[in-house]
Every structure is written in structure tokens, then in C-alpha cells.
């Protein structure tokens, strides 16, 4: 184990020379590249805070997932795509958190699975002409980064605060979206060609739906797990559910149906045991559910039945995309076409929005074949099982339904490769496991 003495390290720096060089650098940048200068100053401030208050910077990093940065600011900066730059910056900011808190490797199987996928990619996959080594490395870094968030050994009180932030992200996104609407930078609502109106906050509607999906599921679990914050989580549950329905995104709503039904079953059972206060929850939940569904019926009809398709229900081009990717993967079924190859597979045959197939099982079958896809899914199941065993019996049914909902949701969207889902999902799994421990992790479990 290695301990990092931040105070000793920082006191050894020649501050006068450091300040002088920084001032000269920023002064020159202001003259020639003012945008770069502003970005550099902000980054220096964030890095300073991350070193002095690593827990605070973790809250900031979580809050950034409430905004789909790559859809608000297109193009690149400093030679990086906006999304790649964002991932690089949050990794830099979290390095001090890792050094201070250490790492716990009980939840590391997905990270090892990604390493094996890289080996499969360079050793066994049959590449198509569009594929390259740089695409594979970039995909590995981008897909692996969220799994690093499973490893950070947060203090229990920090993990609890992070859970409350995670549950609040949809509301925060809508709040930021209102401010961006007022500033004329982004529309709070989007209107599809079908005429459906969708709430999108500071995101696009599918990304806000991902945040809301996690927000609803987290609230269900935390209501059962953290009764001391029950009012907060009930309030957020209602708001997050309304936001989810407002996005008009069908996949997460359908995936959460079993959890919602179990919740009504659970509180009905409590009411029948003589706990009369649960009657208000039953009535309130029924009113919110019925009202939200009624208000969205027209939108759901427009999105599902406006266009005539072979399946009878409009799946927004997914069936065509799935067939396309499965056909292209057929030439290398066991080792796939290489990690990241799905991102360059669309040759113009499909709608340009299908950069990946909107089905994570097909996506990783395309990239890693049967071997890679099964390995990754097994590694995720291993993590789910570790967290499940750490939970109290009363919490386990809700957690199991979250995992089931995630597996269903992954059939229709990019759950493992979209920032607004995979970062909150991995972060919550880690915090849930950490917060469920009776005491701080023993030192033998932590490397720092």
C-alpha cells in the first residue's frame, strides 16, 4: 500500500516560479487564444479543488452528467471531440479522489472483461476496411472509464451524498434546461416530425429519459433502504417519474413497469397489515401514475403508430438497424469485428443517428462476437451479485428489479455507451455497495 502525502508534496513545489510561469502562459494565451485561456483557468481551478477537496469535486463531476455536453456544443476543442475531452477532464479530476480514497477491486470484473475484449480485437477479430487501431483504443478508453467508477472506495457519508445527487440529476437537468431556454441556447422541449412533444431538459429527450430512469429506480430503492430521507426520495420519485413520462421515451418506461407494479404490491401489503398511512401513498401514487399516462397518451400514439411498419409498432428504425448490424457481424461471429467497429459500421444505409445499433447485446456481439459479448455480460452479472449480497433483505427485491429493468432497457438503447446512463449506473452500484457496508472498508481491501 502506498500513501500519498499531499501536504508534503505540495509544500515542496517552488511556488514563486510556478506562479510566474503560469502567469506568463495565461497572459500570452489571453492575447492570442482568449477561449483557451478561459478554459485553462477553469481547469486549473477545478484541479486545485480536486486536490484540496476531492469529495467536493466528485459531486461536481456527477452534476456534469445532467447535461449532454456533446449535443449542446458541437465540434471539437484542442484537437479533441467534445465528448472525448469531457471524459478526459473528469478522469483527471477524479485522480485525486482515487489517490485519497483508494480502490476496491471487488467490483472490477467489467474492467478486466474490457481488457480481454481489446486482446480479442487485436488478436482474433476480423476487421472491416473502416476499422483501425485508433478506433479500437479510443473505444476501449471510452467504454472502460465508467467501470473505473465502480472501484473508488468512497467514505460512507460521501457515498450517501452522492446517492442523493444521483436521484436529483433529472430535476437538475430540467432546471438547467429552463435556464438554457431563457438564454436562447437550447430548447427545453423538442418536437418530432410526428408532432410528438418531448421534454429534454439540458439533454436530448432519450438522454434525459436515461437520467430519469435511474432517478426513479434509485428513489424506489432508497425509500426502502434510507427511511431517514424518505420525504426527499418520495418527492424526487414523483418528479422523476413525471420527467420520464414527459420525455416520451418508451424503452425505460416499459422496463420500469415490473418495479412500479411491485411497489404498489409492497405498499398494498403494508396497508393490509394495518398501516393506514400507506393508503395515502397508494392513492397519491395512483393519481400521479394515471395523470402522467393520460397526458402522454397522444404523444405515445404519435411515436408508436404514426408510421406504418412491418412490426405494427414504430420502433424508430431499430428493427432495420438490428438487421443491418447482425448481417455485417455474420462474417466473424465468435470474435466480432473489433472493439469500436460498430461506430463506423453505418455506411449510409441507415439513418445517420444509428452510430451504434441501439441494442447493447447486438453492439457487443458486433464488436466482440459471442465470446466478447458473453464475457462482458457475465462480468456485469458478477458485479450485480456482489452488490446484491451486500444489501438488506428488504431492499433486494427492488435492486433485483433495477437490474432486470437495465437488462430489458439494454435491448432498445445504448445503456453501456451513453454517459447519461452508464456513469450514474456504475456510480450508484458502487455507492450502494459502499453505503451498505457496516463500517469503512478494512485497509486490506483498499489499494492506494
Image (cartoon, helix red, strand yellow):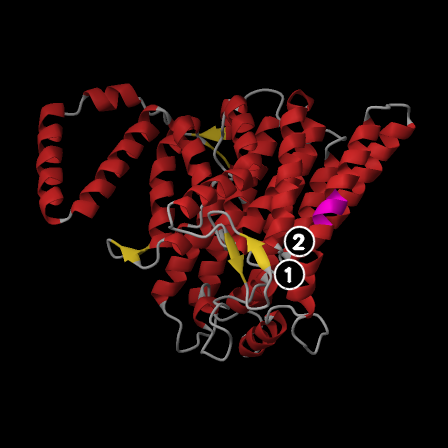
Please name the residue shown 8% across and 42% down the image.
Answer: 28
Residue 374 seen: yes
Please name the residue shown 50% across and 25% down the image.
Answer: 158
Q: Is residue 62 magenta?
A: no
| Residue bearing the label numbered 2 | 407
Image coordinates for residue 382, horizontal then vertical, percent: 63, 45
Confirm or deny contact between disc 1 and disc 2 (CB under 8 A).
yes
Instruction: Tell me where residue 260 sits by quadrant.
Output: top right
C-alpha separation, residue under disc 1 versus residue under disc 2 = 7 Å
Disc 1 crowd rating (10 Å Cα; few below 14, some 14-19, many 20+) is some
State left or right for residue 431 relative to residue 263.
left
State left or right for residue 132 relative to residue 351.
left
Image coordinates for residue 387, horizontal then vertical, percent: 64, 37
Residue 387 seen: no
| Residue bearing the label numbered 1 | 411
Please name the residue shown 73% across and 36% down the image.
Answer: 396
Which label is found at residue 249?
none
The quarter of the picture where the C terminus appears is top left
Disc 1 secondary structure class: loop
Image coordinates for residue 361, horizontal then vertical, percent: 61, 62
What range is drawn magenta here?
Answer: 289-293
293 vs 269: above or below: below
The quarter of the picture where the N terminus appears is top left
Please name the residue shown 49% across and 30% down the image.
Answer: 153
Instruction: Tell me where residue 8 sits by quadrant.
Output: top left
235 vs 64: above or below: above
Disc 2 crowd rating (10 Å Cα; few below 14, some 14-19, many 20+) is some
Please name whichever residue, 241 or 299, is drawn nearer the observer in this view of the structure.
299
Amino acid at each position: 500500500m502506498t500513501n500519498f502525502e499531499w501536504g508534503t508534496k505540495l509544500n515542496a513545489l517552488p511556488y514563486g516560479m510556478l506562479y510566474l510561469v503560469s502567469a506568463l502562459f495565461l497572459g500570452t494565451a489571453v492575447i492570442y487564444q482568449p477561449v483557451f485561456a478561459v478554459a485553462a483557468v477553469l481547469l486549473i481551478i477545478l484541479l486545485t479543488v480536486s486536490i484540496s477537496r476531492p469529495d467536493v469535486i466528485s459531486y461536481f463531476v456527477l452534476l456534469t452528467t445532467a447535461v449532454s455536453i456533446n449535443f449542446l456544443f458541437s465540434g471539437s476543442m484542442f484537437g479533441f471531440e467534445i465528448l472525448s475531452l469531457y471524459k478526459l477532464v473528469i478522469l483527471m479530476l477524479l485522480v485525486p479522489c482515487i489517490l485519497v480514497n483508494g480502490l476496491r477491486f471487488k467490483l472490477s470484473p467489467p474492467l478486466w472483461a474490457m481488457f480481454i475484449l481489446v486482446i480479442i480485437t487485436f488478436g482474433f477479430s476480423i476487421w472491416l476496411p473502416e476499422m483501425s487501431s485508433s478506433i479500437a483504443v479510443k473505444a476501449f478508453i471510452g467504454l472502460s472509464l465508467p467501470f473505473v467508477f465502480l472501484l473508488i472506495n468512497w467514505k460512507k457519508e460521501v457515498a450517501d451524498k452522492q446517492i442523493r445527487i444521483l436521484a436529483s440529476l433529472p430535476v437538475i437537468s430540467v432546471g438547467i434546461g429552463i435556464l438554457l431556454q431563457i438564454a436562447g441556447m437550447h430548447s427545453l422541449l423538442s418536437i418530432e416530425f410526428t408532432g410528438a412533444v418531448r421534454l429534454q431538459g439540458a439533454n436530448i429527450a432519450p438522454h434525459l429519459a436515461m437520467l430519469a430512469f435511474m432517478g426513479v429506480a434509485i428513489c424506489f430503492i432508497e425509500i426502502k433502504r434510507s427511511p431517514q430521507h424518505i420525504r426527499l426520495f418520495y418527492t424526487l420519485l414523483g418528479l422523476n417519474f413525471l420527467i420520464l413520462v414527459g420525455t416520451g421515451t418508451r424503452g425505460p418506461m416499459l422496463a420500469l413497469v415490473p418495479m412500479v407494479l411491485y411497489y404498489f404490491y409492497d405498499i398494498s401489503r403494508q396497508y393490509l397489515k394495518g398501516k393506514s398511512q400507506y393508503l395515502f401513498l397508494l392513492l397519491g401514487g395512483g393519481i400521479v401514475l394515471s395523470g402522467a399516462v393520460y397526458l402522454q397518451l397522444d404523444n405515445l400514439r404519435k411515436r408508436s403508430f404514426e408510421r406504418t411498419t412491418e412490426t405494427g409498432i414504430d420502433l424508430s428504425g431499430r428493427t432495420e438497424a438490428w438487421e443491418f448490424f447482425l448481417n455485417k457481424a455474420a462474417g466473424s461471429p465468435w470474435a466480432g469485428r473489433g472493439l469500436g467497429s460498430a461506430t463506423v459500421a453505418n455506411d449510409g444505409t441507415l439513418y445517420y443517428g444509428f452510430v451504434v445499433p441501439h441494442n447493447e447485446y447486438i453492439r457487443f456481439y458486433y464488436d466482440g462476437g459471442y465470446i466478447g459479448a458473453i464475457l462482458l455480460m457475465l462480468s456485469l452479472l458478477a458485479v450485480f451479485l456482489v452488490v446484491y449480497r451486500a444489501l438488506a433483505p428488504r431492499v433486494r427485491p427492488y435492486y433485483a428489479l433495477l437490474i432486470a429493468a437495465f437488462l430489458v432497457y439494454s435491448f432498445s438503447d445504448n445503456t453501456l455507451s451513453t454517459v447519461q446512463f452508464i456513469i450514474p449506473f456504475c456510480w450508484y452500484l458502487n455507492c450502494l455497495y459502499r453505503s451498505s457496508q457496516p463500517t469503512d472498508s478494512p485497509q486490506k481491501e483498499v489499494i492506494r
